[in-house]
Amino acid sequence: MPPVTPHTEIINELLKLAVDSGVSDIIIKSNKPGYVRLAGKLKPVEMDPITCPEAQAFVDEHVPRVFKANWNDEGQVDFAYAAEGVGRFRVNAFHQRGLVSIVMRHIKATVPTFEQLGLGQTADALIKLSQAKDGILLVCGATGSGKSSTMAAMLNWVNQNLDKHIVTIEDPIEYTFPDDKSLFQQREIGLDVPSFGLAIKAVLRQNPDIILIGEMRDRETFETAISAAETGHLVFSTMHAATVAQSLTRLFEFFPPEEQIQARRAIAGSLRGFICQKLIPTLEGGGRVPSNEILTADTVVKNLILEGQFEKIQGILEGSGDSNSFSFNKDIYRLIKAGKISKADGLRFSPNPQALDMNLKGIFIKT
């Protein structure tokens, strides 16, 4: 193994401090000390500033050869980095005002379980969705909301309980899955296949039962997911959307107005469910607990999508007695009553704080 260079040693020390402190994200801005995000809050690290040449040298040294052209020509790049004795990290390097910045996210070595993530009662709904024979499951949320971890926990449950051939397409690979009852094939863009498009085109020829697509990023990706769902595959993917309503809207944005009726048929036929997630600070402090909004696409939901009556879906989330579909307010109400989060934080993270406040006072409006 080659000796560790001084710039790598500086950053490795920052990464070790971060991992030892339970930090999720590390932010390096040239000529500033490192910053970390702990329980959602940004904090500076007591250390000497990392210079632009040090940050530049770190990226130049560790960016995979296949990505060097991206870095040199586009000024930004994504890749995975493994620090000896510390762990693996997802890296995004970029330029701002002519200087180098690096954002790194710690990828935990062990695939999480529902219990470790604190998903509690939500796990029953996630397990039911994970047992679908085909269709599309979308895990949604903002950056840093824990959606990748929740999706990994769902696949971990499949791995421990079902015999499936699972092919993942990731940029980069986050969690590495050991083969248990299921068999995993994990493909990293740039290392195992040159591009996301090529991986998507090839995946249906690889005899998968389940396909994980790291992100539902464009129409081509979504149309491939629909084709896979229609031919008997279960597709997991993530999407940047805050709520079920926003997630559904984003899907239809992939299609022009003249194709909306066709899109409604395709989405109604293939969708199995949305899992939307936020992380809310715990009442004890020092951590965060997931809150979820889940829509299971049953016959009623599919008919509403087919008819374009999207405005009625929120009513199903709020009024459903089905434990497999519920709104953020229902889950936040549960977390407050269970003493997991404060009322103030619950109202702050609620998409409809006025309705939640009424619920907490014992007032519920029938939908």
Image (tube, rainbow, N blue to C red):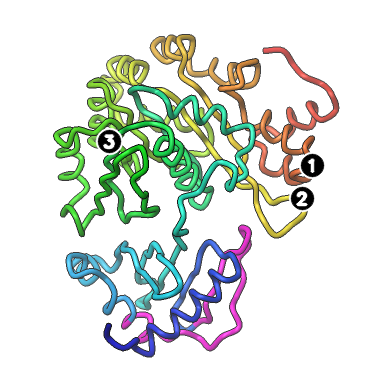
**Pointer 1: what residue?**
339
Specify the amino acid type for callout 1. Gly
Q: Position of residue 79 (x, y in %)?
A: 31, 63
Specify the amino acid type for callout 2. Leu
Q: Is residue 84 left or right of residue 19?
A: left
**Counting other residues with Cα less than 10 Å from the Cα at mark 3, is it few (<14), some (14-19), or many (20 or more)?**
some
Rendered residue at 36%/49% (across/down): 178
| Residue 336 part of the magenta-drawn span | no
Q: Earlier in the sequence, mark 1 or mark 3?
A: 3
Rendered image: mark on residue 60? none
Q: Position of residue 29 (x, y in %)?
A: 46, 76
Quarter location, residue 121: top right
Looking at the rendering, the stretch of residues picked out in magenta corresponds to 32-57
**Pointer 3: what residue?**
165
Q: Position of residue 336 (x, y in %)?
A: 77, 38
**Counting other residues with Cα less than 10 Å from the Cα at mark 2, is it few (<14), some (14-19), or many (20 or more)?**
some
Q: Earlier in the sequence, mark 3 or mark 2?
A: 3
